[in-house]
Image (tube, grey):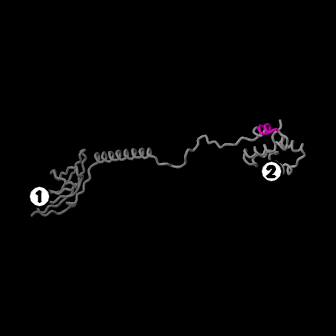
Amino acid sequence: MKTIGQIIKDARVRKNYSLKRIEEITRIKSNFIELIENEKWSELPPFPTVLGFVKSLTSPLGISEKTAVATLKRDYPPKVLNINPKPDVSSRFTWSPRLTFIVGIILAMLFIFGYLAFQYIGFISPPRLTLDSPKENQVVDGSSVLVFGSTETDAKIVVNNQPVLVDNDGKFTVSISVTSETKEIIVKTISRSGKETAISRRIQVTSN
């Protein structure tokens, strides 16, 4: 079974036409005709153009146009398509309202869980306590000593077993009566969960 290239070349040879002569008759460049005869499809223009060339060659060479077109379609190699089994729909990131909603939900959940974790840790942890006065081994001249410092706003303060009020900033101040037998001041802060922090300071009380 002859190919389209063989059919065209054999017909041209029978007519005793050179490539140059066919070019003069059809206005198709001789190099294109030669490429068709040799079936070098990759060096030719796209298929619709080649199809037009073949149709134009059929009449001068005495070839059936119908046969030539059918043979060309049979012989012309199919176009190779690069098919991606997993096509990349879009490599560009697009911020959508749905994504905004999802991110908002995630951030809200993180905030809630973070807040609850912070509250839980604070609930089970011993309360903070800072004691500014008295200092360690402080000499007390008189019958009382000023005790002040700071703690958590919701904690309770006890100084030498005496309850002390805590203000809205967590600060406390109290004057504690002492005698020459008083050797130390013990400050305790107790959280709502019952956790306790204590600081003791030794003092020296001088007689009046």
Tally of marks: 2
Q: Is residue 153 magenta?
A: no
Q: Residue at x 21, y 51 (%)?
A: 188
Q: Nearer the viewer, residue 157 or 8?
A: 8
Element class at badge 2? loop
Residue 50: percent from the left, percent from the top?
76, 45
Residue 125, percent from left and from top: 29, 48
Q: Which range is magenta?
A: 64-70
**Residue at the top extreme, as displayed:** 1
Q: Residue 69 lies in magenta, yes or no? A: yes
Residue 34 seen by the camera? no
State which quarter of the image contains the C terminus.
bottom left
Q: Is residue 164 left or right of residue 116?
A: left
Determine if residue 130 is in view: yes
Q: Quadrant of residue 204?
A: bottom left
Q: Name the residue located 86 percent from the left edge and 42 percent from the top edge.
A: 11
Query: Dot 1 lies on which element?
Result: loop
| Residue 137: x %, y % from top left | 20, 61
Which label was assigned to residue 179? 1
Residue placed at 63% from the left, 42% from the top? 83
Provide the major secondary structure of the magenta segment: helix
Residue at mark 1 to residue at mark 2: CA–CA distance: 128 Å
Looking at the rendered structure, the kind of residue marked 1 is Thr
* Disc on the earlier residue, 1 or 2: 2
Q: Where in the figure is residue 130, as x and y percent of width and height?
A: 24, 56
Write the residue at 17% across / 52% down.
Answer: 165
Relative placement, left or right, of 121 versus 174 is right
Q: Residue furthest left?
A: 208
Q: Amino acid at mark 2?
A: Arg
Numbered tag placed on residue 141 in the rendering: none
Q: Nearer the viewer, residue 145 or 78?
A: 78
Label number found at residue 27 = 2
